[in-house]
């Protein structure tokens, strides 16, 4: 069963207002949140074997911080186009061209594309509370795991997925206290 993991980059810094958006680094909060998301992925056996990552600085930094927690080997593609996508249909089109060997795909990118894509794909949620949280927002560091049932990547279409997991860093903070 193909699985899609959508991960929004961790919290980025706005300290240098003259910096291009593409070049913004992670903020301290993001530097702390990304490894917690990586540990959550490891602990819950959310293991991608194929990673598509935007080439923006904050997405690359997020990838670097979660990668030590991901077990197994993953093919990693850094793609400029993810940063420039303007509609969920753009990401769906890209996903339709994944290789057959990519059965568990992690996309590390930006909003609103990731949130819009998750909302477009999810037909139902295993946990109604997680489904409601996803509908409400997709904050920095959010991770959605969507099982595509028996839908191969070339046939990817709206409402063909089941939300299997959804977590945000703030919820992981609560679990630690």
Image: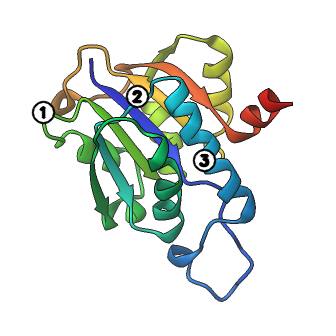
Horizontal placement of 115 versus 84: left or right?
right
Answer above or below: position of 176 versus 76: above
Disc 2/disc 1 C-alpha distance (Å): 19 Å
Residue 49, horizontal then vertical, whole percent: 28, 37
In this rendering, does residue 140 appear at all?
A: no
Of the numbered discs 3 and 2, the one sitting upstream in the chain is 3
Q: Is residue 86 left or right of residue 76?
A: right
Marks 2/1 in contact by CB < 8 Å: the verdict is: no
- The disc, 3 or 1, on the residue closer to the chain's N-terminal end is 3
Specify the farthest residue to the right.
177
SS state under label 1: loop
Q: Residues within 10 Å of mark 2 (few under 14, many from 20)?
A: many
Q: Secondary structure at mark 3?
A: helix
Residue 133 screen position, x and y as percent: 68, 27
Q: For mark 1, does the 10 Å Cα neighbourhood hold few (<14), some (14 to 19), or many (20 or more) residues?
A: few
- Characterize the local packing of mark 3: few (<14), some (14-19) or many (20 or more) Cα atoms within 10 angstroms: many
Q: Which mark is residue 100?
A: 1
| Residue identified by numbered label 2 | 121
Q: Nearer the viewer, residue 3 or 44?
A: 44
Query: Where's residue 9, x and y in %?
Result: 55, 54
Q: Is residue 12 above or below residue 115?
A: below
Q: Which marked residue is nearer to the observer: mark 3 or mark 1?
A: 3
Establish if 94 lies above or below 156.
Answer: below
Q: Residue at x 40, y 28 (%)?
A: 121
Q: Taking 24 as reference, is 50 left or right?
A: left
In this view of the protein, which residue sits in the foreground, 86 or 8? 8
The CA span between labels 3 and 1 is 29 Å
- Looking at the image, tell me whether mark 2 or mark 1 is earlier in sequence order: 1
Instruction: Give the quarter of the image for residue 29.
Output: bottom right
Residue at the image position 30 percent from the left and 62 percent from the top? 79
Q: Which residue is mark 3?
A: 35
């Amino acid at each position: 069963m193909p699985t899609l993991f959508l991960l929004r980059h961790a919290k980025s810094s706005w300290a240098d207002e003259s910096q291009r958006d593409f070049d913004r680094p992670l903020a301290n909060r993001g530097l702390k949140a990304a490894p917690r998301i990586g540990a959550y992925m490891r602990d819950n056996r959310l293991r991608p074997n194929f990673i598509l990552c935007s080439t923006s600085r904050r997405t690359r930094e997020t990838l670097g911080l979660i990668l030590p927690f991901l077990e197994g080997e993953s093919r990693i593609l850094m793609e400029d186009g993810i940063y420039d996508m303007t509609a969920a249909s753009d990401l769906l089109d890209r996903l339709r061209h994944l290789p057959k060997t990519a059965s568990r795909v992690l996309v590390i990118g930006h909003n609103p594309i990731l949130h819009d894509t998750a909302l477009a794909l999810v037909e139902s949620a295993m946990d109604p509370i997680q489904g409601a949280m996803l509908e409400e927002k997709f904050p920095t560091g959010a991770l959605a795991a969507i099982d595509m049932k028996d839908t191969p990547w070339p046939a990817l279409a709206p409402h063909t997925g089941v939300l299997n997991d959804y977590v945000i860093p703030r919820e992981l903070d609560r679990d630690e206290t």
